[in-house]
Image: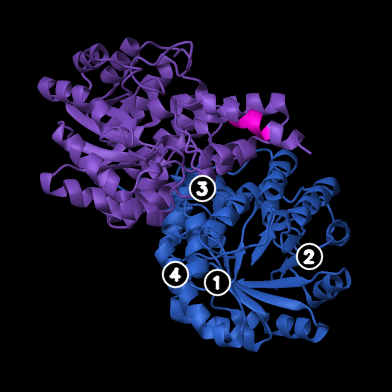
Chain colours: A blue, B purple
Amino acid sequence: MIHDPTLRDGQHAVRHQLGVAALRGYAEAADAAGIPVVEVGHGNGLGASSLQVGRAAVSDDEMLSTVREALRHSKMGVFMLPGWGTSDDLRKAVAHGADVIRIGVHCTETSLAERHLGLLAEQGAEAHCVLLMSHMATPAELAEHAARAVGYGARAVGIMDSAGHFLPQDVTERIGAMAEAVGPSGVPVIFHGHNNLGMAVANSVAAAEAGAGIIDGCARGFGAGAGNTQLEVVVPVLERTGFGTGIDLYALLDAAEFAERELMPAPPVTGSLSIVSGLAGVFSGFKHQVLDHSGRAGVDPRDVFFELGRRQAIAGQEDLIVDVVAELSARRAAP
Amino acid sequence: MIHDPTLRDGQHAVRHQLGVAALRGYAEAADAAGIPVVEVGHGNGLGASSLQVGRAAVSDDEMLSTVREALRHSKMGVFMLPGWGTSDDLRKAVAHGADVIRIGVHCTETSLAERHLGLLAEQGAEAHCVLLMSHMATPAELAEHAARAVGYGARAVGIMDSAGHFLPQDVTERIGAMAEAVGPSGVPVIFHGHNNLGMAVANSVAAAEAGAGIIDGCARGFGAGAGNTQLEVVVPVLERTGFGTGIDLYALLDAAEFAERELMPAPPVTGSLSIVSGLAGVFSGFKHQVLDHSGRAGVDPRDVFFELGRRQAIAGQEDLIVDVVAELSARRAAP
């Protein structure tokens, strides 16, 4: 039930610079702990390495062959955002031995995943569909989109709390609605948390209790800003709550120590802008651009995040940052 | 309803070495944010500075006069463990202008606080009683001890999750029982969390929902090991959950940034031994001695923590560490 995107989501925290030795070492440690799925890739997934979002230190091909070789029992997972990655990237990943392939789309845009999910079903790969920025949709909408994804061939479907906005009750409602919608088909529901409001572990437990079958976690929470659900914490907490994971605790703790030592300059810290973006419900990946534009205009970046939240900004709408900064700056200058 | 022990509990993370400028700067920032109570002292409280647990960089007298001078609106709080501190220390704290004085005792030893609570009531000071290692007592026992503390003169009574062992349901049961027992007297219940299992914020919200009137939090979670409840996270989360705090969010975020920059080498990280001590229900302050003894004997320190948990070790029983290490070492050597 545990899915570990340390080597993919963690890349955001190190500008996609994980090297081959780090990838291999962590994959071996995770494999030894009995983690079911180890996901690897550029932070934005297959095909995303570029000047615009950052070039990865290692190519997709080399990441996949390195981790494939390191895993003896765990499945290898990959992630793709349609637009960044293409059908060719999916075929290549399957050829490299990726067992679990996740397609990520904005929470109300499941149709964008239809073609890719169909392709993967044809190839016999285990395709998952994850809905991003899921706090922006109601439980009913998420249930509807989950059912659609299953119709397209997804063998698991879930939500990412991309902005780290959820409190446990929010998760209970959403996962509950999704599990009810897709449960009869036997397709498990995924929950992927972020820790902006200190709730990643509590939200993950709430998800499991509401019927989620797959919980994501990263070693030491490795990820951008406040980071993800801390894997080596959520696993024993799930065990204590009655959800068996089959993972060896000591080997898991060892893998996390390897990660802290070899993958990251320091574990994630929940700083002011992580908290504000979580409260505002804005993707924290906007941080650098918000700081850049607001700094030049002398506007408080926290105000920018709250205003972006009111405007329901989503990834890809970076232009809104410029508009908001200009407007706040003008408002300040007015008498 | 918010109580901030950053300048007391955080001392554990820097071996009680906070200097005068750091104390003054944080107290001013917390005061500007409208935090109701700012607690200061040696990590183990009044009178505890010693070779045995570590000498503080600044004397009790100077800490109290520095923070008193820095606070314009916030109350000043202090903490005392009977045995480390004495009645003379309490009188001195009152003379220095301490408004809120907390007496800490093991969760089933309220009677040890009777004399001090009585003395403080005579002096007209606001006395609180906090029960340590509170996962070792049942909700009914805690309710009974809370009522006793009120009988001794406590004007607030609460629990510390000293081992960071609680999950939200545990907190709901305990705070609920205590609030029911002392609620009719109008005395608020305190919850003080630690983050060993990633649950400090969720536990604090559960406490407020179960009737707690005072929630403790430290800037960036500043404290030993996994740290305390992160103050600048729990405040907006409580606000979002419907509990007004009267605290200014931006000034609070600024205070936390000051704390990260000026008080600590780095914010707390939840490492292996923090997780294990939380699971085992053992005071994480044992860490250095466990590492020391187990290292010399070639025993896994994680095994030592779990065994200490089975034996229900409490603070002051450091001798048990030696016994446990010797026994595990012998067991390993046996054929």
Q: What is the C-alpha distance between the residues marked 3 and 1?
A: 20 Å
Residue located at (63% from left, 62% from top)? A245
N-term-proximal mark, 1 vs 2? 2
- Residue B214 is left or right of residue B170, and the answer is left
- The residue tagged 1 is A212
Q: In the rendered structure, are the residues bearing label 1 and label 4 in contact, judged by CB atoms less than 8 Å apart? A: no
SS type, badge 4: helix
Residue located at (23% from left, 15% from top)? B87
Q: Are marks 2 and 4 on the same chain?
A: yes
- The residue tagged 2 is A76
Give the residue furthest to the front.
B335
Q: Is residue B325 magenta?
A: yes
Q: Please name whichever residue, A77 or A239, is drawn nearer the observer in this view of the structure.
A: A239
Residue type of the residue flagged with mark 3: Leu
- The residue tagged 4 is A172
Residue B3: x and y, percent?
Answer: 30, 36
Q: Please name whichever residue, A313 or B308, is drawn nearer the observer in this view of the structure.
A: B308
Query: Quadrant location of the N terminus of chain A?
Result: bottom right
From what the image shows, is residue A12 above or below residue B224?
below
| Between marks 3 and 2 in the image, the one whose residue lies nearer the viewer | 3
Residue A140: x and y, percent?
Answer: 45, 81
Segment tinted magenta in the rendering: B324-328
Q: Please name whichever residue, A88 or B15, is drawn nearer the observer in this view of the structure.
A: B15
Q: In the rendered structure, are the residues bearing label 3 and label 1 in contact, judged by CB atoms less than 8 Å apart? A: no
- Residue B54 is left or right of residue B159, and the answer is right
Q: What is the C-alpha distance between the residues marked 3 and 2?
A: 28 Å
Mark 1, other Cα within 10 Å: few <14 / some 14–19 / many ≥20: many
- Residue A326 is left or right of residue B238, and the answer is right
Q: Are marks 3 and 2 on the same chain?
A: no
